[in-house]
Image (cartoon, rainbow, N blue to C red):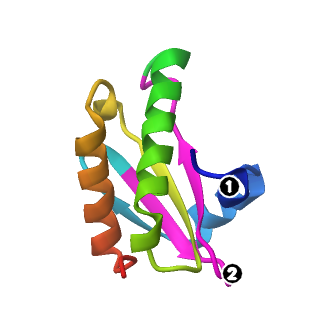
Amino acid sequence: MLPRNLRLRKNKDFKIIYQRGCSLKGEYMVMYYNKNGLNENKFGFSISKKVGNAVVRNRIKRILRECCRNNQDKIANGHNIIFVARSKIKGINYWLVEKEMLELLKKAELLR
């Protein structure tokens, strides 16, 4: 699991990234990012109630967290990154989520 200290949890942090950060859109998710001036990345996840019930939303969050944890060493340090799930993400497997996440990170030039 992704350690708690590497997760964004405060609403004000999310708002700052939404307002000042850049965004990229994919088929299953939208990625917002900006620099944080630290030597580590912090990740946030947002899944709307439109995607599904609590069980579905929590499963999607677990998949997104695991993708970030497994690919943490591939991502350049010093960024805040938020992944916002779109309704199409419901029911897809880990590998498709990971593939799209890496594509979005590559487009943003955040991969090492």
The range drawn in magenta is 30-51
Location of residue 18 (image quadrant): bottom right
- Amino acid type, residue under disc 2 in the picture: Leu
Q: What residue do we see at 31% from left, 34% from top?
A: 89
Give the spatial CA distance, label 2 vs label 1: 13 Å
Q: Which is more toward the observer, 2 or 84?
A: 2
Position of 21 with respect to 98 (left or right) is right
From this view, report whether residue 39 is shown above or below residue 75. below
Disc 2 element: loop
From this view, report whether residue 15 is shown above or below residue 78. above
Where is residue 88 drawn, in percent x and y?
28, 32
Location of residue 24 (image quadrant): bottom left
Dot 2, crowdedness within 10 Å: few (<14), some or many (≥20)?
few
From this view, report whether residue 93 is shown above or below residue 10. above
Where is residue 82 drawn, in percent x and y?
53, 56
Disc 1 element: loop
Q: What residue do we see at 39% from left, 72% from top?
A: 74
- The quarter of the rendered structure image containing the C terminus is bottom left
| Residue on which the image places disc 2 | 38
| Residue on which the image places disc 1 | 8
